[in-house]
Amino acid sequence: MNEFVARTQPLKVVLGIVIALGFVAIGVWMTGILDKPVTPPSAYGTDLTIYPLPASSSRYPDWLVISMGWVCIFLFGGMAVLGAIRLTNPADHLRINRMGITVPSYTDKPIAWSDITDISTWSHRGQKSLVIKLRDPSRFHRKPLHRILDSLNRGLTGGDIGLSMTGTNRTLKQTLDAIEALRPKA
């Protein structure tokens, strides 16, 4: 094996977008956005317009249900947009060869094996990710927002790059096997 490439698998991304849009629909229902106001016929001589209430619960106050609906709309709507962007950009998700690893979401330049101090896995609630620790992360130019997210990622996973293989045509095990096969032996 000379090179290992993980690409976005469109079917998995479309499935993620559909699931995200389902949660957006639940959020819309919870907020009552699409409910049409009911206006009684003018024969009754009133201009009273009755607005239907959003989803209601005897367990939680209405303000909490509406707030959670908006959270669903923004969070999962954002995920659907990111999925659509990922779907329209068929770039490699990860490329591994004898020279090093290329992670386009982190940097455009390949990361040489000599710049990598450790590669491990990190798991949270059954979702496993690849974690790459770099010798000097400042060598790679990152945008300010990405630098903030990198520091959060470092605090959470202990590594500089956290990479999930979800939505790609490769598994984490295949990725680890490729790293084992292509990484120079010390």
Image (cartoon, rainbow, N blue to C red):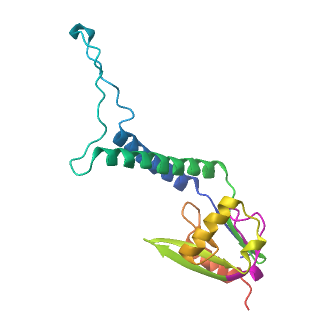
> In this view of the protein, can residue 31 be seen by the observer?
yes
Relative side of 19 to 185, left or right: left
Q: Residue at x 56, y 47 (%)?
A: 81
Q: How many marks?
A: 0
In the rendered structure, the answer to whether residue 7 lies left or right of residue 13 reads right
Q: Position of residue 124 (x, y in %)?
A: 46, 72
Quarter of the image where the N terminus is located: bottom right
143 to the left or right of 152:
right
Residue at the image position 71 percent from the left and 80 percent from the top? 182
> In the rendered structure, which segment of residues is drawn in magenta?
101-117
In the displayed structure, 120 sits above or below 65; it is below
Q: Residue at x 67, y 51 (%)?
A: 89
> Which quadrant is the C terminus positioned in?
bottom right
Q: Nearer the viewer, residue 58 or 161?
A: 58
Q: Nearer the viewer, residue 104 or 72?
A: 72
Outermost residue, bottom direction? Answer: 186
Horizontal relation, residue 4 to residue 44: left or right? right
Q: Position of residue 43 (x, y in %)?
A: 23, 7
Asked if one can make out residue 3 in the rendered structure from this viewpoint, the answer is no
Does 102 lie within the magenta span? yes
Q: Image height check: is 31 above or below 136? A: above
| In magenta stretch: residue 89 | no
When asked about the image quadrant of residue 117, the answer is: bottom right
Q: Nearer the viewer, residue 112 or 145?
A: 145
Residue 135 image position (x, y, % from top left): 72, 81
Residue 132: quarter of image: bottom right
Can you give x and y, in whole percent of width and height, for residue 111 in the image?
A: 75, 73
